[in-house]
Amino acid sequence: MKTFIQELAEIIVREYPDWNNLTVVFPNRRAALYFRKALGEALDTPRWAPDVQHVEAFIGSFSELVEADKLSLVVKLYRTFKQVTGSDEDLDYFYFWGEMLLRDFDELDKYLVPAASLFRDMSNQKEIDEYFDYLTEEQKKFLTDFWQSVEFGTADSKQRFLELWRGLYTIYTEFRQQLAGEGMAYGGMIHRAVAEGIGQTITPPAGRQYIFAGFNALTSAEEAILSWFVLHRKARVFWDEDAFYVQPRHREAGAFFRQYRGHAVLGATFPEQPGAYLGTAKEITVLGVPQKAGQPKLLAQRLEAALKQPGMEAGRIVVVLPDESLLLPVLYALPPSLQTINVTMGFPLVSTPYYTLIDLLFDLHLHQRKGEFYFRYVLALLNHPYLKGRVGDAGNEWREFILKHNQVHLAPSFFEGHALARVIFQPVDLGDFLSYLLNVIEVLATSGGQEGLMEKEFAFHFHRILTRVKELAASEPMNLRMQQRMFRQIARAEKVPFTGEPLRGLQIMGVLETRNLDFDRVIVLSLNEGLWPAAARQGSYIPHNIRKAYRLPTAEHQDAMYAYLFYRLLQRASIVDLYYNTEPDVLGTREMSRYLYQLIYETGWPFSRQVLYNPVQIHPVQPISIEKKADVLEKLERYFGKALTPSTLNTYIECRLQFYFKHLQELREPDEVEEEADARIFGNILHRVMELFYTALRPPSGPWRIQAGDFTNLNDKLEYFIERAFREHFHLPDEKPFEYEGRQLVVKEMVKRFASKVLRHDARSVPFVIELLEANNFTTTIAVRQRDKSLSIVMGGKIDRVDRKDDTVRIIDYKTGKDENRFESIPALFQRSPKRNKAAFQAMLYAWVYAQRHVRRPDEARALQPGLINRREIFKDDFEYGLFLGRQRLEDVTDLLPAFEEQLLMLLEEMFDPAVPFDQTEELKTCQYCDYKEICQR
């Protein structure tokens, strides 16, 4: 079937001999390009082509005003707004509202609305009452934020709001006057000037012939201009319509054609009967695909099969993307056999890697402290796709160093060894920050990365945006935060306009780019509600009832336009594939498009439907049990080459499988920088403070005796030792100034209070002698039978403190959590129960290790007293050091150690028993905070 443009080309070749005086006008550039190609194919011999224009250029040719870019227009509107209202609103906050106001002004002019009348009606007291009811709470908040002085709900709020709204007409007129004085305009301003001046101040040449082709939803200005040319220049209008949607009055796709057929002037340009292309045979397939990612994959498979069919050329296939974010997934999924691809659509700049990179650079410098960079933004940049490959192994080394040494802030000198990193992580004068960003883009664009033409196009557009923001910052002072907001506002509204010229190869287009174009095979992805038809129009200051009264576009207007684009695209196609996402988005919306419902239930057209599903198989959660085969036992023996700590044993008692994952398979959570002080850091710093305090009292030789005088000036000493401990933990050199920040300050005070209480309690026990302090090698060995051999297992770990008071050896464990110092029995310490006292188990294990290392002589009077100094008990007035067996305070645990050793041996023998697997605990409460619960699906 011939396309609309081919039919038009043949008419022009047949009926218009004088092309030198012929102008053909289309709604968009792409149609004009296809028309030139069709015209050449319709000729037998070459000849000069007629003047072919898109409508914006055609209307603009009758005006001396030059259309300015959007950023310049918003800035000029901002200055007019400040001048009229006296507002001191910052530009970065105004920008969003300025864009909305500019759209309203543009529409007012394109639809030839009498602005004075409209703004007067908007400010009418009776009408405004309705508008307040019309506004949602969110809209009221937006308006409040914008106008600042409006507080909805106060007695005089409506009157004050009216006064501000009345100013819109003054802003409108002043803005237009200032633009005209500079020879500039926005699009609607040019359209109004031409529509109102044509035939009076504007007189197109009488000798030319004019053709307008493919128009549908005309603005009032376009309607007036076309009508003038039809009346006064005998212009012809060729409409691309179909009886399917024009004749039934309920079909929204034909709404505009039905309106124009009744027009006093344009009605005569229509044929008596519209075409009937949609009634021709078509092979239509509706494809439901779960999730967005599945559509490009299925598209690639079907495209590859289609291109193998005889006579099917890639250039006669179009892929339409209502969802622009699918462009890159589609391009990456296309089969390699497609050598030529042409993209004609806009791609959102915010979806490009350059946007995230630039935004991260803003954050990097906004959150720097004293010239040093915050680690989170450093790591994010090192993981960015544009930097990760370029910095290579150096980036991995930096990441490892930052995580291993807990580096919260990093100086620029940290990156001195790498040229690109020096550019990224350099100290920047914030007054020249935009020059720094421009330099980063230039360096990346020329640094030999693997990016293709698309990435270079992204770089070009961001360079252009930042250059404009830089020019703007020179005239409108903005701090760095304002510059970032300005950048975000502009980038979010911009698209990379991929507008390739080649007319061969697979065509990939946005919805609006398909106007007037026909293809043999039409493929539409993401045919879901909210995408096609698109979601409701952008915001406006003009309420719906006012828009409707003045014939400004409304949601109904938009729906009719998108419905026409859909059905027109199908008119001359022979094969149609319509994809939709069967999975709702995060809000549960975007069901199948209304057009698909119409096609399925109203049209009566034959079609096939395929719905793909992700197979859902429900399997009961299977218990996990790891048998102790030879390889597992070998790992177990290797692991016991190092000390078996109380913490490791506690893990095994709680859950054998957790022990296997953690210690034999070494599955670990990824390292993270600890920027704030959590409970674990609190414990680490407290232990280090106590170690520093008592280490300072250690004599060069002889007993490590602690006396009453050692506890003088306690407050000053603690301040010094706490800072030392913080510096060590966060790897801060002595010469670097240190300030407690955020929760660090809270933890510092908690450590000081806890340590002070412990030391004051110790002071009441003097004199005593310290035997061990934060000793890492507090271990002993125990023999365990394993099948036919005996294994020597190292038991123990790091002990907080061992001291001797008179005839009592005290084994002290500092606990900063909610640990209890009471247990019910020795067997209870080995039971697999959430109520088991892990802290008491640890204290008893260390007491047993001490007894093994220091065998008591028969004549020796020595009590062995393990105990906890915990947060729960230390602040009580009746605090007593030691463990409690039931209600009995244990002064000496020596008699309990044989029973403890018996239970310990049973536990170790179970560990090596091949018949006892590493299985899951039956106590589900134990799983609540387990790192491996996702593996077990608990």
Image: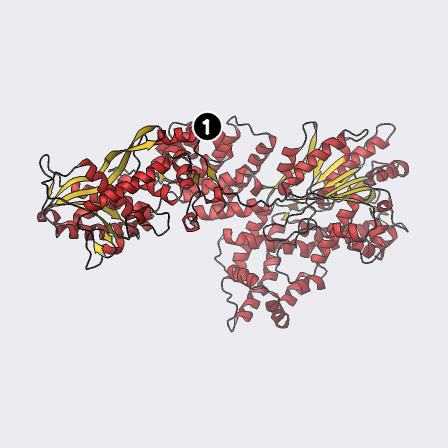
Residue name at image x 47 percent, y 41 percent:
360
Q: Is residue 167 left or right of residue 440?
A: right
Reading the image, the residue beneath label 1 is 392
At label 1, the amino acid type is Gly
Quadrant of the image occupied by residue 345: top right
Q: Is residue 350 visible?
A: yes
Residue 472, horizontal then vertical, whole percent: 51, 45
Does residue 631 sit above or below 369 in this rendering? above
Q: Is residue 902 left or right of residue 376?
A: left
Q: Is residue 474 visible?
A: no
Q: Which of 758/542 is in front? A: 758
Residue name at image x 32 percent, y 32 percent:
785
Which quadrant would the N terminus be assigned to in this image? Answer: top right
Does residue 303 sit above or below 122 in this rendering? above
Does residue 206 sit above or below 156 in this rendering? above
Looking at this view, name the residue that lies furthest to the front.
788
Residue 708, horizontal then vertical, whole percent: 9, 49
